[in-house]
Amino acid sequence: MYHPDLIRHPDGCPALVLNADYTPLSYYPLSVWPWQTAIKAIFLERVDVVSYYEREVRSPSAVLKLPSVIALKQYVKPSQFPAFTRFNLFLRDKFACQYCGSHRDLTFDHVIPRAQGGRTTWENVATACAPCNLRKGGRTPQQAGMPLYIQPIRPTSWQLQEHGRRFPPNHLHDTWRDWLYWDIELEA
């Protein structure tokens, strides 16, 4: 019987990228490189291969197993504070409306509305579902009688990484699990 990796298209074989200390560069979005980038980094001696897929690629003169987990040789210091993006905002707020807890139709809301001088900053923007955002309108949470679950803050990269661990990607290759979840509590 064939191993599932053998029939997988190479484009379905990304490499999990670990930092030089063998921790993931990021959890969410998960740090992965396409197979071509991983092979190039191997030839340029920028990474060590930790694990391989069963899948191979061939050229006229070589046969190469595709790497499934690679580690950078040079440590990359993560930035202390993440970029202010819609995705990072949703991740900070755990993909939940900060007014009702819904996970549907998410958008973002200015806690102090821009019409009242509020700015678009980490400390003034919260995840909101469309119905709550519409109901709040151009008012503050106090004016609308809609308290926030958690006051918005500027998260650190570490905080976002911790939140990201709760939202694993749809596909995890078996060889990745040891590197992504080594520090979670084991079941009895």
Image (spheres, grey):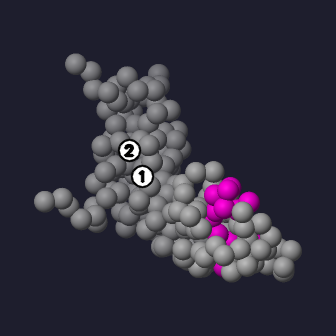
Say which residue label 2 marks: 172
**Viewed as shown, does residue 46 lie left or right of 106?**
left
Please name the residue shown 41% across and 60% down the image. Answer: 165
Residue 187: quadrant of the picture? bottom left
Determine the residue located farthest toward the top in the rendered image. 1
Q: Secondary structure at mark 1?
A: loop
Q: Amino acid at mark 1?
A: Pro
Question: What residue span does the magenta drawing correspond to?
Answer: 119-134
Q: How many marks?
A: 2
Please name the residue shown 50% across and 32% down the image. Answer: 11
Determine the residue located farthest toward the front in the rendered image. 145
Say which residue label 1 marks: 168
Residue 26 image position (x, y, % from top left): 48, 61
Depicted 167 relative to depicted 150: above or below? above
Residue 22: quadrant of the picture? bottom left
Classify 10 Å Cα crowding around label 2: few (below 14), some (14-19), many (20 and above).
few
Q: Secondary structure at mark 2?
A: loop
* 5 inside magenta stretch: no
Depicted 125 relative to depicted 12: above or below? below
Residue 88 image position (x, y, % from top left): 60, 63
Determine whether label 2 and label 1 are within 8 Å by CB: yes
**Viewed as shown, does residue 60 lie left or right of 112?**
left
Classify 10 Å Cα crowding around label 1: few (below 14), some (14-19), many (20 and above).
few
Q: Amino acid at mark 2?
A: Leu
Q: Is residue 79 visible?
A: yes
